[in-house]
Image: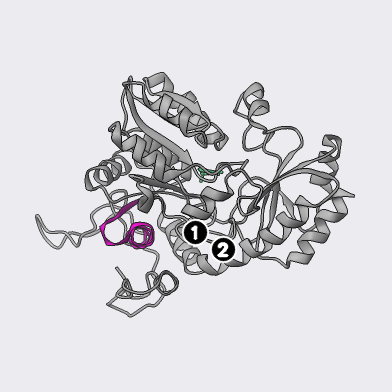
């Protein structure tokens, strides 16, 4: 752990890994591309034996993320993707256990629960977790072991009340799990609101450059963190040393990137909300966004850097996607370059059409991941394709 762990987040992240290598003083954490490690003698270890279990480059990124999310008591395990991290969390539960899940959810998470875990007996019930009554009803079931929240949700940016839900879950002996991918610990701290486990797709803001896939699970509860680390080693879907290094590099600029991305997103969200060819804009920072009050209460900043909107005329969608010149038509989010996504056929294709329609993931909904470009370039790009 860096000896700047008593500093502000920006300072700590800027120097992540910079003080680890005592032998050479390298300020950039080396990539330990070694699968195994020599033992000094029988029964002796350097602390590293085999890279599936622990690798120095991965350990530094895990320690950095643990501290950034939860402080000195937290422990993190880094995985090969966000879904590998979520899979590890789902393995905490057994046949007959039930999980209450945000219904407006990343499609890959839905597919993981339904196609891979349901056949082994995990029960999932999808509810509108912005509706506390619905959460309470779902929690009344005797076998509920956890509530899984995506806050804000993907793609509609609904904001669930983590504090109240964590309280309700705890009173029933259930865990609260929060996918914090969209806001990161720079803007939202689910553990301080009562969450037991925090999950990330590190592919997104934490990495920030669309050049790695990764996932993280963080907990302050030693027994849960231990179980996740056990699963990480036993199943082996670990973050590679090279990707750990890229992630560490990305984390150094996360606060800066997010600030600029969010400032751009705010400008674009306000502009889209007033645009005659846009029928609805989703952005947690807009006063009329249904989750704006809870967002103000449990997060910081202006609303994050994700914006979704509905075009008034669905027939325009293909031309918008092929016409953009600054935005790129691609799935994923959180990188320095702005992306435009069509959730109903890309990220959320695995959710059945009726559910998608009911939730509002329609054929007129587009999702923007706002990057660090010039805001006016981004605005003009959208203006051109909307006209
Ligand atoms: N969680 C959220 C909110 C996501 O948006 C995604 C991917 O888009 C994931 C998890 C899955 O992460 P990965 O693609 O790194 O497996």
Q: Residue furthest left?
A: 42
Marker disc for residue 187: 1
Residue 258, disc: 2
Q: Is residue 49 magenta?
A: no
Q: How many marks?
A: 2
In the displayed structure, 1 sits above or below 285; it is below
Height in image: 33 above or below 16? above
Query: Which percent across, then down, holds residue 356?
Result: 64, 28
Residue at 28% across, 49% down: 53
Check contact, mark 1 vs mark 2: CB within 8 A.
Answer: yes
Residue 77 lies in the magenta-colored region: yes
Q: Residues within 10 Å of mark 2 (few under 14, many from 20)?
A: many
Q: Residue at x 67, y 32 (%)?
A: 360
- How far from the left and from the top, in percent, is residue 140? 36, 23
Q: Residue at x 37, y 20 (%)?
A: 121
The magenta segment is 57-78
Is tag 1's residue or tag 2's residue first in the polypeptide sequence?
1
Q: Is residue 52 left or right of residue 43?
A: right
Instruction: Report whether 167 appears left or right of 304.
Output: left
Query: How many angstroms separate mark 1 from mark 2 (CA)?
Result: 9 Å
């Amino acid at each position: 752990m860096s000896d700047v762990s008593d500093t502000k987040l920006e300072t700590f992240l800027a120097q992540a890994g910079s003080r680890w290598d005592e032998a050479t003083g390298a300020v950039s954490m080396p990539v330990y591309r070694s699968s195994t490690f020599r033992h000094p003698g029988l029964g002796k270890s350097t602390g590293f034996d085999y890279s599936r279990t622990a690798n120095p480059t991965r350990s530094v990124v895990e320690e950095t993320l643990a501290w950034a999310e939860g402080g000195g008591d937290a422990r993190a395990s880094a995985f090969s993707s966000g879904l590998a991290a979520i899979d590890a969390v789902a393995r905490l539960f057994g046949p007959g256990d039930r999980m209450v899940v945000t219904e407006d959810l990343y499609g890959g998470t839905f597919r993981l629960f339904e196609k891979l875990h349901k056949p082994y007996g995990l029960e999932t019930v999808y509810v509108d977790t912005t509706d506390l009554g619905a959460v309470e009803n779902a929690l009344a079931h005797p076998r509920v072991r956890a509530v899984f929240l995506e806050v804000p949700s993907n793609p509609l940016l609904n904001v669930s009340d983590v504090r109240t839900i964590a309280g309700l879950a705890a009173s029933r002996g259930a865990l609260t799990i929060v996918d914090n991918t969209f806001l990161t610990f720079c803007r939202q701290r689910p553990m301080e609101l009562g969450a037991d486990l925090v999950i990330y797709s590190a592919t997104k803001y934490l990495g920030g450059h669309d050049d790695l896939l990764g996932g993280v699970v963080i907990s302050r509860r030693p027994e849960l963190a231990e179980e996740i680390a056990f699963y990480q080693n036993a199943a082996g879907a670990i973050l590679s040393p090279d990707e750990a290094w890229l992630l560490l590099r990305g984390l150094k600029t996360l606060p800066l990137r997010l600030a600029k991305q969010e400032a751009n997103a705010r400008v674009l969200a306000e502009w889209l909300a007033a645009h005659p060819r846009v029928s609805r804009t989703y952005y947690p920072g807009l006063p009329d966004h249904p989750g704006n009050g809870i967002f103000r209460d449990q997060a910081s900043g202006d609303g994050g850097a994700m914006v979704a909107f509905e075009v008034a005329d669905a027939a325009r969608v293909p031309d918008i996607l092929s016409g953009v010149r600054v935005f790129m038509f691609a799935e994923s989010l959180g990188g320095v370059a702005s992306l435009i996504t069509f959730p109903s056929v890309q990220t959320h294709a695995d959710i059945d059409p009726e559910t998608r329609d009911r939730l509002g993931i329609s054929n007129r909904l587009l999702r923007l991941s706002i990057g660090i470009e010039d805001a006016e370039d981004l605005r003009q790009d959208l203006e051109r394709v909307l006209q």
